[in-house]
Amino acid sequence: MVESVSSINSATAAAAASSVEKVQEEEKKETQTTKTTDKVTKTEEKSTEVKETTMDRYRVQRLVMEYLEKMEKQYEDSPWVKDQIDMWLATFDVDKFMVKYPELYTEMDLSSIMYNETVNFV
């Protein structure tokens, strides 16, 4: 009877050890797969990363003029707004504007900046 109990204990100990080994192996596999997926996602991010360039001065100037023309049309019944826009245009310098706002990548960037510049006219 003692021999049978000891054989059962040794069998359960071996089963427990093998299950611990299986868990450790699964953890190693998971860490390896996460490492490889991290490497893949990093390389995908690098390949999909598009380097944007800032707008050139002629495009900025054209878009500023278009924005102000739309604003004048919108508030054509208000002479005060037109006067404010004219005064702003008289002092407008594209180069200084681009130095003040160096990260102009899209028309939406410029539109939001122009809104902030002209919001006090309305």
Image (cartoon, rainbow, N blue to C red):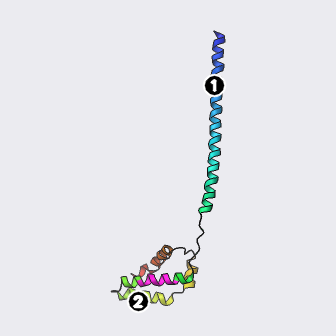
Disc 1 crowd, CA 10 A, few/some/many (<14, 14-19, 20+): few
Find out whether residue 96 is within the magenta segment. Answer: no
> Distance between the Cα atoms at labels 2 and 1?
88 Å
In the figure, residue 31 lies in which quadrant? top right
Q: Classify 110 as above or below 72.
A: above
Task: Write the start and end of the magenta stretch as one range.
Answer: 61-69
Where is residue 113 shown, x and y percent of the image?
49, 76
Where is residue 77 shown, x and y percent of the image?
33, 86
Instruction: Check disc 1 and give the amino acid type.
Output: Ala
Where is residue 87 shown, x and y percent of the image?
45, 89
Q: Closer to the camera: disc 2 or disc 1?
A: 1
* Disc 2 to disc 1: CB gap under 8 Å: no
Q: What residue does disc 2 label?
A: 83
Q: Please give left or right for residue 85 compared with residue 104 in the image.
A: left
Element carrying mark 2:
helix
Q: Classify 81 as above or below 46.
A: below
**Front position in the image: 44 or 19:** 44
Element carrying mark 1:
helix
Instruction: Check disc 2 and give the amino acid type.
Output: Asp
Where is residue 82 shown, x and y percent of the image?
39, 88
Mark number displayed over residue 15: 1
Disc 2 crowd, CA 10 A, few/some/many (<14, 14-19, 20+): few
Q: Classify 67 as above or below 86.
A: above
**Front position in the image: 119 or 53:** 53
In the figure, residue 78 lies in which quadrant? bottom left
Q: Please identify the residue farthest to the left as the structure is shown.
A: 77
Find out whether residue 64 is within the magenta segment. Answer: yes
